[in-house]
Image (cartoon, rainbow, N blue to C red):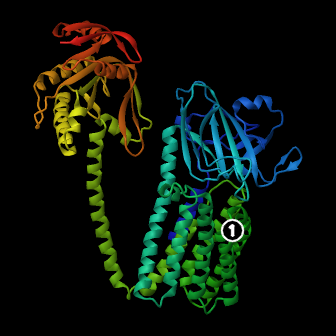
């Protein structure tokens, strides 16, 4: 058992240290030289080092030439304690940061990504003088500044060898403001993978804590006299809240609109209450060697700080963080002393717990230095708390193994439930994929599932078709909704079959208008021939078509071709759409067309005539007509 904890301890040490085979470059005097950095081989780089610093100014790249006063500040760090023109800066205020990044001019990559956890406590980010994003609302007072903490990734393209980053940062809601954490910079896939890795790590801890908390609370449910199991279960819930509101801020994925104040209260109060549960647990477990007055003193102090955190704004309650961390440190020492006394009295369960406490001591020191910006690692107390609780669970399991045989059966049932749920999720996933293919072309859906964003393509040549049902609005006014929808479904189903026959891509329906395209998302040489073939077959198949109510249905069709841009828009309801002059013109050809005729542009006619199959199609010149937004255009009827 000791070996297991030693391995876990060493793994945590390795995880919290830098493990890059190549020395990371550091910014000097506001410049980060990456000319010798190969992003494809060397991976992600941190934008650490000296940034240019301008106090009480919100500047953009074009403003710096006219600003004479500047200083340099370490990133990551807070500006409190720095001097600006002889004045020591407070924790609150507003400022601008600037960093110039020089990349390898011979690199073939021009797509980059930046990962920012958050800045204290609101920021606005410019990349090459272009506003890229931000968190909250920056301002020069507490009334105009709105704090926010949401980790974000920014993707951008540049053809320049020099990249200029400017961050306008303001803080009036926390004890210290500035660029708190390292900013990661690299290729998009690497940055996204880093984010997914960190989130996965958080999720693994959260999942483990949920399972352990459920196990402990179930133990208490079946044997309510065992108060330590309840305390441990609640402690794990507090630790769960803690890890969800730190590092990758997983809680913001569940509640994107969570306020900064509430996030800080979750982060700090959960830490204090987790320590309360830890001290109380050890005291109850080894009450014969524990000092009740000292334990009560620690519990009272942490509960008092928790109340302050919950009822005071973060700008005030955060001032107690350093003192709380001191008490956390001494609380861990107190727990270790109790465990040593227990071991001396032949209570060997203290051996397992003391290992967790030593680990907790190490992480408490790390987090104290990190939260006071003395080292650049990460908050790792939740890892130690998880391992500590695993050890405590082992102690309880040994104590109650015989009494809780029924819980083992319950665990087996839970495992079966998980397997069944996994199967259900697999079925639901297949349904979702089928639904996605009904909305998007298969190749586009596959790219989207592979994580490609944004999806945008340019096609030099493609053809567009618009079909409109003439006088459908008048007909629908005389029909009930069910009849109207049923007739539209029958008509558009016929169109879908014809579209599939000619290998076209249905784009969308807009009311009683049907839109299809040829040459996207896969280019094809015969796009004009295919779209013309569908138009002619629609007119042929639908000739003399009548609704169930006896209404004659006739159509107008418009065609055009040319360069097209296609892409996916939306985040919750995806749509694959097209943009470009041929799209607008084809729509105009339909709108200003003649009922029962296929109207096309001159360029569409010319493309068909230049093709080897041009002799198969004949055109009737309509002449020049006035087209809204286009002026006079010569158009033709495809016959």
Q: Identify which residue, 134 or 323, lies in the foreground.
A: 134
x and y percent of residue 367 in the render? Answer: 66, 63
Q: Quadrant of the C terminus?
A: top left
Q: Is residue 15 above or below residue 43?
A: below
At 89% from the left and 46% from the top, the residue drawn is 86
Asked if residue 386 lies left or right of residue 492, the reply is right
* Residue extending furthest toward the right: 86
Asked if residue 402 lies left or right of residue 261, the reply is left
Judged from the image, the secondary structure of the residue bearing numbered disc 1 is loop
Q: Residues within 10 Å of mark 1 (few under 14, many from 20)?
A: some
Q: Is residue 113 above or below residue 162?
A: below
x and y percent of residue 169 in the render? Answer: 69, 46
Label tally: 1
Asked if residue 450 lies left or right of residue 2, the reply is left
x and y percent of residue 418 in the render? Answer: 32, 66
At 32% from the left and 28% from the top, the residue drawn is 521
At 81% from the left and 38% from the top, the residue drawn is 70
Quarter location, residue 517: top left
Q: Identify which residue, 145 or 592, lies in the foreground.
A: 592
Task: Report whether residue 440 is seen.
Answer: yes
At 70% from the left and 85% from the top, the residue drawn is 294
* Residue extending furthest toward the bottom: 288
Quarter location, residue 616: top left
Q: Identify which residue, 472 or 590, lies in the foreground.
A: 472
The residue at which mark 1 appears reads as 312
Q: Identify which residue, 279 or 35, lies in the foreground.
A: 279
Task: Report whether residue 459 is seen.
Answer: no
x and y percent of residue 199 in the render? Answer: 49, 54
């Amino acid at each position: 058992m000791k070996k297991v904890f030693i391995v876990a301890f060493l793994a945590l040490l390795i995880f919290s240290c830098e493990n890059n085979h190549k020395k990371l470059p550091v910014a000097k005097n506001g410049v980060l030289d990456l000319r010798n950095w190969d992003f494809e081989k060397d991976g992600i780089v941190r934008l650490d080092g000296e940034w240019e610093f301008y106090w009480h100014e919100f500047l953009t790249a074009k403003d710096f030439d006219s600003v004479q006063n500047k200083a340099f500040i370490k990133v990551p760090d807070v500006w409190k304690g720095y001097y600006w023109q002889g004045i020591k800066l407070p924790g609150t205020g507003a400022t601008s940061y600037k960093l110039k990044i020089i990349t390898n001019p011979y690199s073939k990559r021009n797509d980059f990504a930046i990962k920012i956890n958050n800045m204290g406590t609101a920021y606005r980010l410019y990349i090459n003088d272009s506003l890229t994003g931000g968190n909250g609302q920056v301002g020069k007072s507490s009334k105009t500044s709105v704090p926010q903490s949401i980790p974000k990734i920014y993707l951008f393209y540049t053809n320049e060898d020099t990249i200029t980053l400017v961050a306008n940062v303001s803080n009036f809601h926390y004890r210290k403001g500035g660029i708190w954490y390292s900013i990661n910079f690299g290729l998009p896939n690497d940055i996204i993978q880093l984010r997914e890795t960190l989130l996965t790590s958080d999720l693994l801890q959260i999942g483990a804590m949920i399972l352990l908390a459920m196990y402990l609370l179930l133990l208490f449910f079946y044997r309510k006299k065992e108060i330590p199991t309840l305390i441990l279960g609640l402690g794990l819930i507090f630790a769960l809240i803690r890890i969800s509101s730190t590092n990758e801020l997983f809680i913001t994925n569940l509640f994107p609109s969570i306020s900064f104040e509430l996030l800080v209260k979750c982060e700090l109060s959960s830490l204090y209450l987790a320590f309360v549960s830890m001290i109380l647990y050890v005291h109850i477990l080894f009450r014969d060697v524990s000092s009740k007055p000292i334990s009560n003193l620690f519990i009272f102090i942490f509960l008092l700080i928790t109340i302050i955190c919950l009822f005071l704004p973060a700008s005030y309650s955060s001032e107690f963080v350093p003192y709380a961390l001191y008490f956390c440190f001494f609380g861990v020492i107190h727990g270790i002393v109790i465990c040593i006394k227990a071991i001396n009295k032949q209570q060997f369960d203290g051996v397992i717990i003391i290992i967790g406490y030593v680990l907790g001591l190490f992480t408490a020191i790390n987090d104290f230095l990190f939260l006071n910006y003395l080292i650049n690692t990460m908050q790792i107390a939740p890892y130690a708390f998880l391992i500590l609780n695993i050890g405590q669970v082992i102690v309880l399991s040994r104590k109650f193994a015989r009494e809780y045989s029924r819980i083992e059966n319950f665990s087996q049932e839970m495992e079966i439930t998980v397997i069944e749920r996994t199967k259900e999720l697999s079925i639901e996933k297949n349904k979702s994929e089928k639904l996605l293919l009904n909305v998007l072309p298969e190749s586009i859906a596959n790219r989207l599932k592979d994580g490609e964003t944004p999806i945008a393509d340019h096609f030099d040549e493609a053809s567009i078709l618009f079909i409109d049902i003439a006088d459908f609005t008048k007909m629908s006014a005389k029909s009930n909704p069910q009849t109207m929808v049923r007739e539209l479904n029958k008509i558009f189903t016929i169109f879908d079959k014809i579209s599939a026959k000619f290998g076209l891509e249905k784009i969308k329906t807009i009311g009683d208008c049907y839109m299809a395209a040829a040459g996207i998302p896969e280019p094809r040489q015969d796009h004009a021939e295919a779209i013309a073939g569908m138009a002619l077959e629609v007119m042929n198949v639908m000739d003399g078509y009548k609704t169930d109510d006896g209404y004659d249905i006739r159509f107008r069709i418009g065609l055009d071709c040319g360069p097209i841009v296609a892409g996916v828009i939306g985040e919750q309801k995806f749509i694959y759409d097209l943009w470009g002059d041929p799209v607008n013109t084809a729509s105009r050809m339909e709108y200003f067309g003649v009922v029962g005729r296929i109207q096309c542009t001159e360029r569409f006619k010319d493309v068909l005539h230049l093709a080897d199959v041009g002799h198969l199609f004949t055109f009737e010149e309509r002449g020049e007509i006035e087209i809204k937004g286009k002026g006079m255009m010569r158009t033709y009827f495809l016959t």
